[in-house]
Image: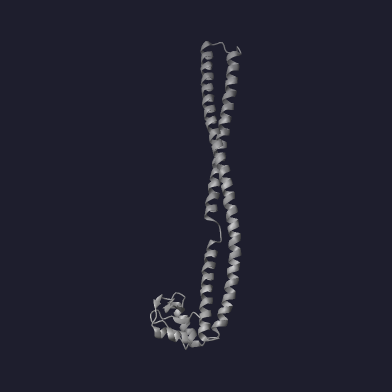
Amino acid sequence: MSELRVLDGLQAVDTALDRARAELEQVLGQLGESAEVAAARPALDQLRRQLTEEQTAALDLELQIQQHTQRIADDEKKLYGGQIRSPKELDDLQRSVEGTKHQRAGAEDRLLAQMERIEQTRAAEATAEVELARLTRAWETSQSELVTRRDALRSQAADLEQQRSQLAAQLGAATLAIYEDLRRNRRGVAVARVERNTCLGCRLALPVSIVNQVRLGRGLTRCPTCGRILVSVR
């Protein structure tokens, strides 16, 4: 195999290897916990804490209502039991009963409002649970696909690296040094094909003399504009 054909093949392998490495880096960056899942979990936890607080508040109100009811029952028993005969004491006790009933009514109103809040929070919690489950399933599926792609890219890169070593071994040290230097300075593209008298590396027209040299394949011919090694499309 001529040196130019080896260089052309090496460039093709290096281009494929660069792409595989770039995609592998991207895939590795996407592996890990999802930002959406990470945000959804504390949001759900917050709703659960809120629901617990609201339920505790409702229990407190229920206890207040029970205490008011018991106090009313006790006071009415005294009021109508005939044990108290003083008109003033009876009047004071009657006002106390009415005041306790008013307090109980207020607690019942607050409990009703609190139960509505609890239902709203429960609905929000259920929605958040469904959304978290959906996001988690999507993340798990994505992670599985990414792991499969990661393994495939690693295998592909290993094969390409082996091909690269085999091709590089067929080049002289001086030629390989020129190639590697061009790769570093020309964004990874050291070898450019010639098509329709144009360097496909810089997309500029080539002198006829340069095109003829490339077609003859005698030694390394470089683009006078970008300096890349030129090879014929044939």
- Residue 7 seen by the camera: yes
From this view, report whether residue 129 is shown above or below residue 102.
Answer: below
**Residue nearest the viewer, comparing 166 with 221:** 221
Query: Looking at this view, is 34 or 158 the one in front?
Result: 158
Q: Residue at x 50, y 87 (%)?
A: 173
| Residue 102 vs residue 138, the one in the foreground | 138
Of residues 120 and 207, which is closer to you in this image?
A: 207
The spot of residue 111 in percent (x, y) is 54, 30
Count of numbered marks: 0
Q: Which residue is drawn at 59% across and 27% down?
A: 66
Colour scheme shown: one colour
Q: Which percent across, then down, holds residue 203?
A: 41, 75
For residue 124, above or below residue 144: above
From the viewer's perspective, is residue 226 above or below residue 122? Answer: below
Viewport quadrant of the N terminus: bottom right
The residue at 59%/16% (across/down) is 78
Residue 55: quadrant of the picture: top right
Please name the residue shown 60% across and 63% down the image. Answer: 147
- Give the quadrant of residue 187: bottom left
- Does the rendering let one see residue 190? no
Q: Where is residue 94 in the image (x, y as percent from the top left)?
A: 53, 16
